[in-house]
Amino acid sequence: MKTYKQIVHEQKSLFLYVLLTYVIAGVAIIFREPLYGIFGERNYVTIHLIIEIFICFFSLSIAVQIWLISKYNPKNRTIYMGALFLMTGILEVNHAIAYKGMPYFIQESGPYLATWFYVIPRIMFPLGLLIVFLLEEKEVSSSSRLQSYALSILFSLGVIAMVYMPTQLLPVLVDENGTTPLKNNLQMTALVLQIALIILLVKRIKVMPRRAILMIAASLYLLCSDIMFVSYKDVYDIYNFTGHIFQLLAYLLLFKAIYYLTVEQPFNKLIEANTSLEQSEQKIKQLAYYDEITTLPNERYLMEYLSKNLKREESHKALVVFGIGRYYSIKNSLGTKYTDKMLVMITERLQKFLPANYVLCKLAEDRFAIFIEKHDDAKKIYNLLQQLKEMMEEPLAIDHFALNSNIDIGISLYPTDTIHEEDLLQFAKFATHEAKKSLEHVAFYTEDMQKAQSERIVLENDLKNAIVREELFLEYQPQLNLRTGEIRSAEALIRWRHPKRGLISPFAFIPIAEESGLIVPIGQWVLERACRETVAWQQKYKQPMKVAVNLSMGQLYQEDFVNFVRQTLQQTKLKPQYLQLEITESMTMNTKQIIPVLKELKELGVAIAVDDFGTGYSSLSYLKDFPIDCLKIDRSFIGNILENPNDEALVKMILSMAKHLNLKVVAEGIETVEQLDYLLHSDCDKIQGYFISKPISYTALETDFTKIQQFATEQLSKLKVKNS
């Protein structure tokens, strides 16, 4: 892409070439008579010879230059142009030798020889260029170069032989009266061809601007030389001399044009390519060794730095790795725009807080590392990290959000824990995982952490195959409708029976599934299985049954999730009104992305519930904006509802708010008859918990449903009688 300066420069160049044409032609026209015969016969022969030497030099230099360059870039246009200049150069040499007044060579020099050696290349040159530029440019074989130049030499030798024949085969072009009509007609033919060439070059000026301008200017000079050669009285006329000057300038510009085409342009492209390569290498290095968002050194940089500096001094060193709590929750709810800003702000805080001799690096998405080159004891590191933790707990103001985040810090020590850089980093990562379980969120590496982390990795690998091996299954916890006394809904809960470890708690494998991305295929499996088993139950009992399925953040942000739900309902033949999808409060932060998805789900006919209501971080304002049907009160409020006035007040508030917003309420974690009695008289719609039934398999639900329903009916009846 040309710059504005380049375009202006090209326009100025063309203007100067045209201006020079006017100046030279103007001088010749104005001072034609005073300058007539000023050089004298001998001087004119010498001047003519000098001009011709330059013309021959330029022509043959172009031919040689193209011959050498085309070996590496064999393009048909370039090669044919080189052959054309070779022919022109050879004939121009003969023109100079045969000029009147030159020493004897084969024959006595004179107008006949000189004129024909001039006229033939003057016609062949523009004609050849026209043909060359009309050809489609393509690569040719290396033999084409030799063939083209050989044909050029043979043609030139043929012309030389024909002109030097003892018997004149060609008519005379110059006689005692000056130039003959034939000579003028041939000159006019060259002039017309030159005009045609100029027109063609003007049309292609956008394709090859600089070369086209040089060749247009050269053609313009050759055109002027033709006009001068047609108009001069005899060889002593200033017009004849001016014609040779124009011809010399033309070949000079042609030399520049070909030099630009074969040398300067490829060289500039090579420089641009090298510059681009250097920039690309710099960019690759930047991408390879620095984090794109924070511009901090990355893990590769850290490993190379540790490799070079870890054993340089015999001193105690430490590597700190910490992860940003709630990073993925914020990313999934608000998007990468906010987490990117969050990482930049955290980086700025760290750079201000940490001493200059500490090496700060950015590892994975939510992790940072700090390498401490020298430390006295672990207690000082611990105190420093406590200050770091306090600093990071301060809210981050991003747009209209104040995001709170804690950090989990892991530390490994050199040479106490290891003397190898790979292990030092790995051990710090192990400690970071363990720090999540610590109340202080800080942990120094110990040997048992490696075993725990290894078990976690093994568990993740086993989880990948759990669906295929049919190790996952669903349990259902019935929900009792306090108004009708019927059980017409149940929550589907995933379980994993490991072939070696037995039942594994969801609290153990669900976080692994979320971190590894396995939560999406697992969530799809849960939805499909829950819908299919619910339909089977409905067909057996001939009664309606609604199933509640929990959604993960990954599912909700999955592309085309709504279509997946639609297809699942169609394939399993479950009517949409019998499916309830449950989200958590943390999913409601990114309203712009979540609301459209939930509205599309509502249009399908499914119900939307907010699970574990009251434990999240979101504003309650989303309740009026989101298409929600139900709130589920978290078990943490229900457990102490009779002993803790605060929990009781919160439950009453939720029930009252739900009633005013026309939302249904399900209370979770009902374990005693007293809790059931309280909720029965508190406008709660449904309850679920161990008091009615623990989560049971689908088979058990089929077998024991009547018994569970009967127990629930009896309990409600007793309470109603008791309170009547």
Image: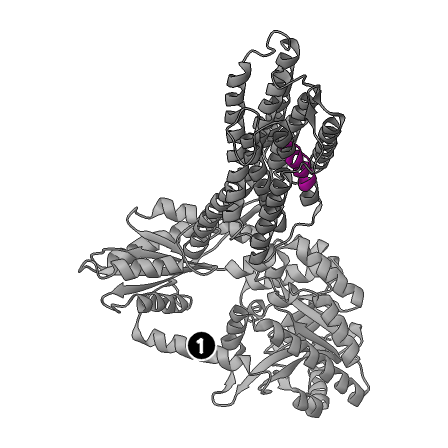
Q: Is residue 265 above or below residue 225?
A: below
> Is 115 included in the stretch rendered in magenta?
no
Decide if residue 425 is on the left or right side of residue 551: left
Name the spot of residue 230 as percent of width and height, x first. 70, 23
Q: Residue drawn at (60%, 87%), measured in percent from left and top?
A: 470
Tag 1 secondary structure: helix
Task: Tell which residue pokes out farthest to the front in this image.
Answer: 167
> Is 119 included in the stretch rendered in magenta?
yes
Which quadrant: the N terminus?
A: top right
Quarter-wise, where is residue 125 in the image?
A: top right
Which quadrant: the C terminus?
A: bottom right
Mark 1 residue crowding within 10 angstroms, few (<14) / some (14–19) / many (20+): few
Examine the rendering and report whether any part of residue 483 can be seen. Answer: no
Q: Nearer the viewer, residue 136 or 521?
A: 136
Q: Is residue 547 above or below residue 664?
A: below
Quarter-wise, where is residue 583 in the image?
A: bottom right
Task: Tell which residue pokes out farthest to the left in this image.
Answer: 314
Name the spot of residue 151 as percent of width and height, x first. 61, 50
- Prevailing secondary structure class for the magenta stretch in the rendered image: helix
Q: Is residue 42 above or below residue 481?
A: above
Q: Which residues are magenta?
A: 118-129
Q: Nearer the viewer, residue 374 or 648?
A: 374
Q: Residue drawn at (59%, 82%), measured in percent from left and top?
A: 467
Name the spot of residue 293 as percent of width and height, x first. 49, 51
Quarter-wise, where is residue 485 in the image?
A: bottom right
Which residue is under mark 1? 457
Residue type highlighted by circle 1: Ile
Q: Is residue 51 above or below residue 66?
A: above
Name the spot of residue 453 as percent of width and height, x first. 40, 75
Decide if residue 591 is on the left or right side of residue 306: right
